[in-house]
Each structure stands twice: as structure tokens, then as C-alpha cells.
Amino acid sequence: MSAPPDTDQGREPITLGLHDATPAHLVEAMANDVVLELGWGRLIFGQTFADPAVLASALAHEERGRRDICIYARESHVLISRAPQELFIDPSHTYRLRFGAPHPTPRAPAGFTVRHLQSSSDADEMNRVYVRCGMVPAPTDVIWDNHNNAEAVEYLVAVRDEDDVVIGTVTGVDHRRLFSDPEDGSSLWTLAVDPSAGLPGVGAALTEALAAIFRDRGRAYMDLSVAHDNSAAIALYEKLGFARVPVLAVKRKNAINEPLFSPAPETVDDLNPYARIIADEALRRGIRVEVLDAETGEMRLSHGGRSVITRESLSEFTSAVAMSRCDDKRLTRRIVNEAGVVVPRGRLATFDADDHKFLDEVGDVVVKPTRGEQGKGITVGVTDHGSLDAALARAREQHPEVLIEQRAPGDDLRLVVIDGKVVAAALRMPAEITGTGTHTIAELIEAQSRRRAAATGGESRIPMDDVTAETVTEAGWSFDDVLPEGTHLRVRRTANLHQGGTIHDVTEQVHPALCRVAVTAAEAIGIPVTGIDLLVPDVAGEEYAFVEANERPGLANHEPQPTAVAFVDFLFPGQPGLPQAWTAGTVPSGT
């Protein structure tokens, strides 16, 4: 097969939708062999190729770690026949919004603003959102160059009003401007919303804003491609007026697309996100994955005569002694303190007047069982005797021994240490809701809990328990109150992710001194893979207080940082990993 013309090399595509057969008289009016570079891959407009052999050759030039998409091929079956071992039909639906019909006035966003890309830092933030959604990121310079020089490409971002953080993004392509499309079409790609955004309607607002741009230009329609099983996205698009059209997309059989043409064994699909990220990284390297117990995330990884059993990020290389040290929070405190790590004042509860005396001395305490995980039984911010007694009883339900610690100021910082190195750092924030002016606090909590559960595979939910009720009451509200639009309310005291908390990557901002503290604590405990929790007033400063060490940190919570890469490197030293573009994300739920 001949290669595409040199003038088309280096420009690349996305996923789209149009008629499989474009009339010959229309083809003559279009540019030939159009390929648009978008960084994460190339968008190949199949209807602009006259020769299916040249189109197949264009797809064959996909770079490693990229995700090219061919849309609007005139004869998809003929294209596949040119390279049946390399190409496949993407199992996605194409949806079209026709601009000729009347359209409802979009509702004004609440708590965020949709705008055009403004800086290269916006492009960095777009990639952060992509990876949080399991999508392939794009080089920042490609996005920024397209924004400045490619008039056919539109980048929009949704920015939270209170802190100017990018929480969503969408890319649009103007077919008329790109290749003189006689159908006056346009398309939407890479719609992504940060699962921890906490604000409703971001995806809909981005879609409507992009549609408004193309409608004002006189385009006839806007297409998009969405995975056939992404029922939530399909419901959103149909609500916004999109209708399915019979259009196919063609992709290459590569590691990123593998789940689309070669489904993983059912047992791998049953793994939770914390085990699945490790299984995916191992499979990409050619390491055999045998799921021993999907419910607990237990797997056997084998390669080159080496076999390791893991349970999520816990492996055979973590000793029973190290595990027992992490499991007993009182013992953990003593060990790391002897190594020079700062720990808050604390005592083992005696469930008598001495506990109250300690509270009176320090003023504000945290109560937690000496053994346990996922934040169960922990109460933060205890300041009076009645609350202390209730917190002690709550902790005692989880374990008979309870620890009382002076509450240190600051936010919860998790540092993931693997093989003596900090590979990720993130602030963990308590569950928070944002008022809409129409929904009760209970309704907002339930909605946010559903969003967190959907984003984490059911791992994160906000409990509707006494702690949540007390937190809401202390802030001066009740579950039945309607929270004013734009008002933020923390509904949990602890930042535990399993209880609806969110995580925010700060790997690039964290002070080296804090990293050294984490490594020192891990070495003192004797654990090779751990999550060290500190309370810090400022991640860029050196002040901290040690909280605890987790023997099984959730690596999936720290994307885009290469935690799974580092973990598999540790398990199989010398076994080369794949380029970061391959390991940063999985196949997106839709393009």
C-alpha cells in the first residue's frame, strides 16, 4: 500500500460521524486525504480519501501510544478488508444535533463558567481532566498550537468560579473550515468532566456552548461519537436533542483500544479500580494476570519465571511485620516518632475522666480506633466532653482499643511511597456539596454520592449517618434545608475517599522536605509500598504532623501520576514499561 501524501503526514484525527457513502460530485469539492492532529491521536476524515488503500495506509502510520480514529469512511467494510488483522469497527454510536430545528435556551451554568482556551496552562489542566476520566492525554504544545493556528479547531473549558480550576473540557472541529465540507458539518470530541468537580450540568453546558458556536457559523449539524454502552452519556445527548445516525468509525488494534476489539476475561472486569489499574499495566507489558479473587482484588502476576501475588497495591514483598505495624496506629506512631518524624500528642483511651482531662489540655482532638481502615470509626474535631464520649463509643464499635490525638492544623496530604521514592502526592478533601438554590441538602448529598460512586466504581460514597448529620448541623443547617445557589458545604469532617472525599494532585507542588518525611516513615516501618498521611498547613511548606501509614494505598486515586507503573516496576525490576502516553489512561467511555 502506498503512504499518504507527505503534505498530510503529521496531521491527525478524532472520532466522528457522517454518511458512509458521500456522493461523488460532493467529493470533488472537498480537500483530499484530510488528517487532523489532536495530540492524543489523529482524526482521519475518511470521506476525503478516494483510495481505500491510501486510507488504510494512513491508519497504519499511527504512532505508538496514540489513538487514531477514522470517521466517515465511504466504504468501511472495504477499508477493513485492506488490513483485517490491524483494523476494526469501533463499537460506538454516532449522534447528530441538527441545527435547523428549534432548540431550547440553555440554562445558565451555576458555579462555573464555560470559556475558550486562554493559556498553555489551560491545556495542562485539560490533560489533567482527560487522565482523571481515563482518557489519553495530548502534548500541551499540540493543543496550544491548534488553538493559535488551526481555525477549524475549537477548545472550550469549564472553569469553577470560586478558584478558576478547570473542571471540564470539550473539543470541536469545523468541517467547513478544515476541508470545505459541502455538507457544512461540525463535530464534538473529547468531552470530559472531572469526576471530583462536584457541580452538576458541566457536560451539558460544554456541549451546548460548542453547539452554539457552530450554529452561529451557519453549520448544518454537529456530530459526536459515544461508546454504545455509555448509557449516561447517551441519555444526556438525547436529552439535548441529538439523534443517532448510521455512521461508523474505524480504529487500529492497539493496546489502548484492546478492550474494544478483544474484551478482557470476565474476572478482570470484576476487579475494583484499585486492582484493575495494576492488572491493566501488567497486561500492557505482557505480564500474565491471573485473578485469584476478584472481590478482594487478589491476583497472581507472572513473567519470565517470576511470580508475585498481589492484593491491590499490597504484595508478597510487604512483610507481615510491616503490615502489623501499619495496622496498629499506636505502634505506627511510636516507630516513626523514634525515627524523628513529628507526631501529634496522643494517648490510648481509658474511657474515664483522664480522657476528658486530655481534651481539656489540648482543646481539639481526633478519635480513632487503633486498628481499621477506610475512615471507619474516626471522628475529627471533637471539642467537648459529650462529643468525646460519643466519638469514643463510635470508635470502640470498630476496635476495643481507641486512640485520642491532638488535632493538628492543615489539610490531609497523602504521599505514595514505592521502593523508597515518593511517586505521587495529593491533598484529600472532605466530601462537599454545592447549593443549587432548589435542592435540599439531603438531595445534594445523595446526588454527589451517586456521582462519586460512578466515578470510582462504587468505592466512594457519602454515608448518610450520624457523623454527616452532626457535620451539617454544626454548620448551621439541616438535611431538609435548601442550600443557596453557589454555597459550598462540607458534609464530612474526614477526607477519606471511601466516604465521599475527593483527591487533588499536588505532586509538582509538594515540598521536598515532606517527601523526605514520607520516605523516612516508610523506611522506619519497613514497608516498600505505602501511603503516608500527613496534616500540612501548606503543601509547599515544611510544617507537618504525621497521621498514619496505609499498607494498601489506592493507586488509581493518583492518576495521572504513574503509580501503577512504579508498582509494576517494583514487582518486576528490569521489565520495561510502556511510554507514559500508554500508561496514563485507559480507553475513554466516549470520544
Image: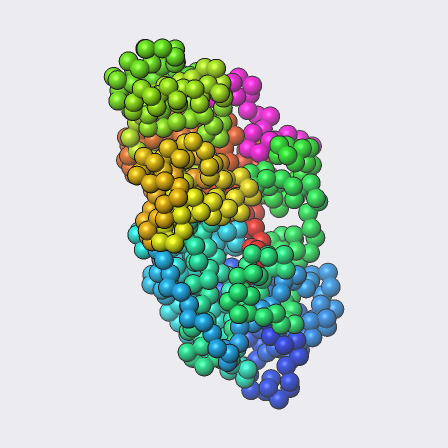
Q: Residue furthest bottom?
A: 25
The answer to which quarter of the image holds residue 316 is top right
Look at the picture and state if 260 lies above or below 182.
above
Horizontal side of 251 relative to 365 (left or right) equals right
Q: Nearer the viewer, residue 386 or 126?
A: 386
Look at the picture and state if 336 lies above or below 268.
above
> In the rendering, at what x and y percent does residue 278 appear?
58, 39
Q: Is residue 318 magenta?
A: yes
Q: In percent of the image, x 69 and y 33: which residue is there?
A: 292
Q: In percent of the image, x 39 and y 11: which residue is there?
A: 350
Look at the picture and state if 548 lies above or below 291.
above
Instruction: Tell me if residue 518 can be seen.
Output: no
Look at the picture and state if 100 lies above or below 536.
below
Q: Nearer the viewer, residue 201 or 300?
A: 201
The magenta span reads: 304-329
Q: Nearer the viewer, residue 203 or 304?
A: 203
> In the rendering, at what x and y percent does residue 98 appear?
53, 76
> In the rendering, at what x and y percent does residue 411 appear?
33, 35
Q: Residue furthest front?
A: 480
Q: Is residue 221 magenta?
A: no
Q: In percent of the image, x 36 and y 40: which residue is there?
A: 478
> In the rendering, at what x and y percent does residue 485 appear?
33, 53
Q: Quadrant of the C terminus?
A: bottom right
Count the marks: how many?
A: 0
Q: In percent of the image, x 43 and y 63: which residue is there?
A: 205
The answer to which quarter of the image holds residue 378 is top left
Q: Which colour scheme appears in the figure?
A: rainbow
